[in-house]
Amino acid sequence: MYKASTHSKVSGTRPSDIKLAINDLVLDGSEYGAIYSGSSYSVIFASDGPEQRLLGPAILEQNQYSDHLYVKHTHDQVYILAINDGEFLAEYQFDTLNPDPEEIERLQAFVGLYHSTLEKWAYTTNASVEASQGGASFDGLIELPVLPENHSSEIDLNDITPVTSEELKKSRSKREKAKLKGLALVAVLLCAFMAFFIFRPEAPKPVQPVKSPAILKVTKAQPNEYRGLKAFYTQNSIEPRAVLRNFYRDITGIDNIRGWRVVEAKVAINESGQLSEVIKVTSQVGKMVDLSAAVHKGGFSLNVIGKDAYLAKTLSTQPLFDNYAKFHIGSFHTWLSSAVDEWWSDVDYSIKKVTTASTEPWSISQAEITFPDIHPLDLPNIGGLVHGLPYSFKYLQIKTVNQVADTWEAVLQFEIAGVEANDRN
């Protein structure tokens, strides 16, 4: 297995950001991995355990390309790593005889976003490449929408030795003590990734075809039909990971002020169309001077009513993508519902259609997730779970259930825009 189980990527080289990324991974159960440090960014490749061979950091050490794909075929495994704008974008690995349908779904989503530019990307591979109807065929196993003539042979993938995973905290302290150049380790996750695959496994036994959640057949959309969908993803959507991570930091910082406790907090779109954050705190013995210092540091406005105080501010946001695709709404609801059920208990998942013009061939669907037992510490993990996928942040409310036991409940909403039926044209 060459692929990391998860990643963390952060721009900049501040040790505090690197430590935060490692701590988040460790808290999420990823204690082992390897770190790549670039000139302006770093990536933490987390593994399921020690002594795992990770190919991503080894390839990045040799990469000199801006937009590039690395495709390595070994026995019945195919590993792919993508570089975009000179930085790590994502990696993927699949078994040609039994591919994971959820991974295929993410790859198809990537094609929807990058299909118009992939033909300009160069690629490196140890596979035999032939021209095909959809671009280039690699050993007759997969087909990617790249031009066969863009093959680069400057790097031999067979000569690259994978990096062995180790305990991340030890790796971090070792780098700090040695004061290595470019200490900018950081965080990537689940950037939804690349390539449209055609599987033709040459197995001695018949293999049951895998029915992956079909997102769409990538075609050029008619401007008049899908310009609203493009505007949603490139202008109106809200990237959730940054919102949830910053919200967690705000709640944790305020909840640690002596004498003050957070009892409720909310992030929602206000009447001006901006995303705003409101945190309600209460106190029996807390000093206003301590709370005022946190208000000033966090950029909040303050409103005090009796023993309760309300901290509010407007948040800056970023859209999800710089392009769009006709994502299949039902597939992404299924994936998200399954993912939260796997990690949190007794979760309620409901779906609501958001009104759009009846003549539009696309629509917006809202996912509302109710967590009866959650902790603010889970919020960055949820952000990492959906990072790079077409889930636009909409709303979050979190309340304390029992301050002594430190238990919380929350309601979280995402919006998914796309099509309700697969495009087969």
Image (cartoon, grey):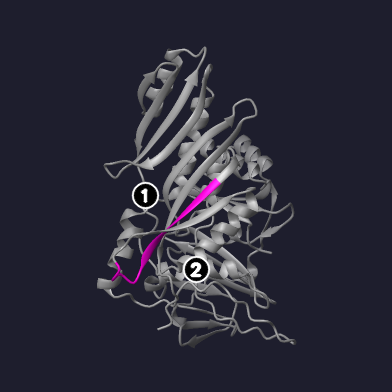
- Decide if residue 376 is on the left or right side of residue 96: left
Q: Residue at x 47, y 12 (%)?
A: 287
The residue that label 1 is drawn on is 318
Answer yes or no: do the residues labelled 2 and 1 have beta carbons within 8 Å?
Answer: no
Q: Residue at x 60, y 36 (%)?
A: 176
Who is closer to the viewer here, 77 or 86? Answer: 77
Q: Position of residue 286 (x, y in %)?
A: 50, 14
The residue that label 2 is drawn on is 194
User: How many other residues sit within 10 Å of disc 2, few (<14), some (14-19) or many (≥20)?
Assistant: many
Instruction: Judge whether residue 193 can be spotted in this image.
Output: no
Who is closer to the viewer here, 75 or 252? Answer: 252
- Decide if residue 227 is on the left or right side of residue 410: left
Q: Residue at x 53, y 57 (%)?
A: 190
Residue range corresponding to the magenta coloring: 358-370
Q: Position of residue 34 (x, y in %)?
A: 64, 51
The answer to which image quadrant residue 270 occupies is: top left
Q: Position of residue 3 (x, y in %)?
A: 63, 62
The answer to which image quadrant residue 222 occupies is: bottom left
- Is residue 113 part of the magenta span, yes or no? no
Q: Which of the image's four quarters has the C terminus?
A: bottom left
Q: Is residue 105 shown above or below 32?
A: below
Q: Please tell me which of labels 2 and 1 falls first in the chain.
A: 2
Q: Amino acid at mark 1?
A: Gln
- Is residue 366 part of the magenta span, yes or no? yes
Q: Secondary structure at mark 2?
A: loop
Q: Is residue 176 shown above or below 118?
A: above
Q: CA distance from mark 2 to mark 1?
A: 22 Å
Q: Position of residue 207 (x, y in %)?
A: 69, 83
Instruction: Judge whether residue 284 can be spotted in this image.
Output: yes
Q: Amino acid at mark 2?
A: Met
Q: Is residue 180 shown above or below 342?
A: above
